[in-house]
Image: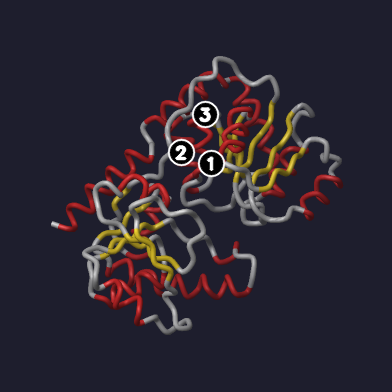
């Protein structure tokens, strides 16, 4: 999302990206500073506070250190809230501790911000309950709607895009696949080594129906979406669920666990089916099969009004209001 923000707003504002580590190329015309917010945690970095005082407005993407520094610098700042995954879904003791610190600190920080933006109505409702703040809803987007494909794919290939982990419910996808017709297969795209899932697949005699791809380059990912029958996810928590919307942009319906931002997108678009348990996944696949053409059309229509261009037009207008 940050990369899209830089691309779409660099012509309207003088932008500087501040991050502890720059993991991607920075667009031409955008300044970049690598700086840690901590010295070390929980002490904030005074150099960051001093740097932020040079700017008219600070935009924080749910960064604890950046929000603390922005408040200490006395600058106007807004926060984009992506939501916080439940502690029980965090994989390590350290991440659980970090989660508890986040839950303790964020309500006050959200209330200190000039504006809190929520990426989904689900997150906006959570922010209201969690921090007693009325968040402005600006949804995530996609680059655009891909050229229409006239007919449904000949194979029922389900596509999962995202982190391959316990929190994302990948094991439930495998269980759901086992209960589905034998012509249905599953492509898993995302980071993390999947040896435990290979074991699950082998034990379930599904290894010939599951393909692990790792992280794909943009062109290969686009091909994966275009060749899929539908996208899928059994994630236990999602603030938004961007792969659902990306699938819609290719005219691909979605079969997802009825939770959070994924449920919101499927209900608002009418372009998919939601399940709660793995045993219900096969019925959802049947629903999508019976209604594929209509769901495909609805997904494309939904994606056409949820583009990054529209997202950052709204952000740009918000920035202008805060600056004046």
Please tell me whether mark 3 sits on a helix, a strand or a loop. Answer: loop
When asked about the image quadrant of residue 112, the answer is bottom left
In the image, what residue occupies the spot 83% across and 40% down? 207
Q: Residues within 10 Å of mark 3 (few under 14, many from 20)?
A: many
Q: Position of residue 273 (x, y in %)?
A: 56, 33
The image shows residue 19, relative to residue 232, as above or below, that is below
- Of marks 2 and 1, which one's residue comes earlier in the chain? 1
Circle number at residue 195: none
From the image, tell me which residue sits under label 3.
Answer: 250
From the image, tell me which residue sits under label 1.
Answer: 243
From the image, tell me which residue sits under label 2.
Answer: 265
Q: Residues within 10 Å of mark 2 (few under 14, many from 20)?
A: many
Q: Position of residue 164 (x, y in %)?
A: 66, 52
Q: Are marks 2 and 1 in contact (CB under 8 Å)?
A: no
The image shows residue 193, relative to residue 298, as above or below, that is below
Measure the alpha-carbon separation of dots 1 and 3.
Answer: 11 Å
Q: Is residue 143 at all visible to an observer of this figure?
A: yes
In the image, what residue occupies the spot 56% across and 20% down? 291
Left/right placement of residue 293 relative to residue 317 reads right
Q: Position of residue 301 (x, y in %)?
A: 41, 26
- Looking at this view, name the residue that lies furthest to the top: 150
Please tell me whether mark 2 sits on a helix, a strand or a loop. Answer: helix
């Amino acid at each position: 999302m940050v990369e899209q923000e830089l691309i779409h707003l660099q012509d309207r504002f003088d932008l500087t990206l501040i991050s502890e580590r720059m993991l991607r190329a920075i667009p031409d015309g955008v300044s970049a500073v690598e700086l840690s917010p901590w010295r070390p945690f929980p002490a904030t970095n005074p150099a960051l506070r001093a740097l932020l005082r040079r700017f008219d407005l600070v935009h924080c993407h749910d960064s604890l250190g950046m929000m603390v520094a922005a408040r200490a610098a006395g600058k106007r700042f807004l926060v984009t809230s992506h939501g916080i995954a439940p502690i029980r879904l965090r994989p390590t003791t350290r991440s659980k501790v970090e989660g508890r610190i986040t839950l303790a600190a964020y309500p006050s920080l959200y209330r200190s911000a000039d504006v809190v933006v929520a990426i989904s109505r689900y997150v906006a409702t959570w922010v209201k309950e969690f921090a007693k703040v009325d968040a402005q809803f600006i949804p995530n987007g996609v680059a655009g709607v891909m050229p229409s494909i006239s007919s449904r794919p000949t194979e029922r290939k389900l596509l999962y895009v995202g982190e391959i982990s316990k929190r994302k419910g990948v094991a439930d996808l495998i269980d759901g696949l086992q209960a589905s017709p034998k012509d249905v297969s599953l492509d898993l795209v995302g980071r993390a080594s999947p040896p435990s899932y290979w074991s699950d697949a082998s034990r379930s005699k599904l290894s010939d129906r599951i393909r692990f791809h790792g992280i794909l380059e943009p062109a290969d990912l686009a091909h994966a979406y275009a060749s899929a029958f539908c996208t899928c996810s059994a994630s236990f928590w999602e603030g938004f669920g961007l792969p659902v919307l990306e699938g819609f942009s290719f005219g691909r319906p979605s079969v997802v666990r009825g939770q959070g931002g994924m449920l919101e997108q499927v209900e608002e678009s009418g372009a998919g089916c939601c399940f709660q348990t793995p045993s219900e996944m096969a019925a959802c696949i049947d629903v999508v099969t019976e209604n594929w053409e209509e769901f495909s059309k609805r997904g494309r229509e939904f994606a056409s009004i949820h583009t990054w261009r529209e997202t950052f037009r709204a952000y740009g207008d918000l920035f202008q209001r805060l600056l004046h």
